[in-house]
Image (tube, rainbow, N blue to C red):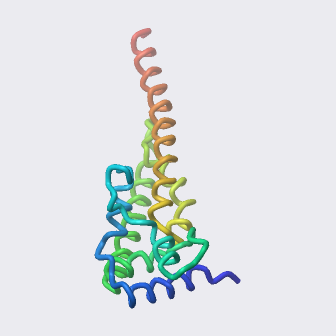
Amino acid sequence: GDFDAYSMLCRIVEYVDVFGFTLGEQIRSVVLFFIPRVIWNIKGAPTGELVSSSQGASYTNLSAPLMGEGYIDFGIIGVVVYAILFSTLLSILDFKYWSNRNNLITSYIEFMVPFLMGFVVFLMRGAFQPIIIRIMGFFLFLMMICLIKNFKVFYRRIFIKSIS
């Protein structure tokens, strides 16, 4: 089997032993992904790239599992907090998805949740920064589909009311 996630977790622990915690730099770069590096020159590198380049690897496009992302930012507390936040977010999305299923108007959640469930594996594998950027590109496309579908429903309602 491939132990990529485990070996990266070990590499992240070694990185923290040498350089210390990043104190939120990695998650800050994820949250503010939409700001280009040209404008924000202190934007951090993806965790897998940061760790592998610091250890002299020639190939730096590596994963960084969710536990590793939490650990490099805030240590064991980060691992626990990231796990709680991730599971809470998935729980909320799941609840909203199933409570919205019988509406005539399609909500964005109905498009987003099944799509996001396919990305959970990639989110758990990491690294967050490149994956979040890719997911946001797809979400914009899903928003467009949702708007078009809802526009058709509203148009039919208005058209039918004006005829009757």
Where is residue 71 drawn, in percent x and y? 38, 81
Q: Residue at x 49, y 60 (%)?
A: 130
Q: Quadrant of residue 66?
A: bottom left
Name the one closer to the observer, 101 or 70: 70
When the figure is inspected, residue 45 is found, relative to residue 4, above or below; the finding is: above
Query: What is the quadrant of the N terminus in the image?
Result: bottom right
Q: Does residue 61 appear to the left or right of 161 in the view shown?
A: right
Which quadrant would residue 15 be assigned to in this image? bottom left
Residue farthest to the right, as pictured = 1
Residue 112 placement (x, y as % from top left)? 48, 50
Return the residue nearer the eye: 55 or 143. 55
Specify the quadrant of the image occupied by residue 68. bottom left
Q: Is residue 136 above or below residue 161?
A: below
Residue 20 percent coordinates (x, y): 33, 85
Residue positioned 29% across, 76% down in the render: 23
**In the figure, is residue 38 to the left or right of 145?**
left
In this rendered view, identify the residue nearer to me: 131 or 104: 131
Q: Residue at x 44, y 9 (%)?
A: 163
Say above or below: 84 vs 164: below
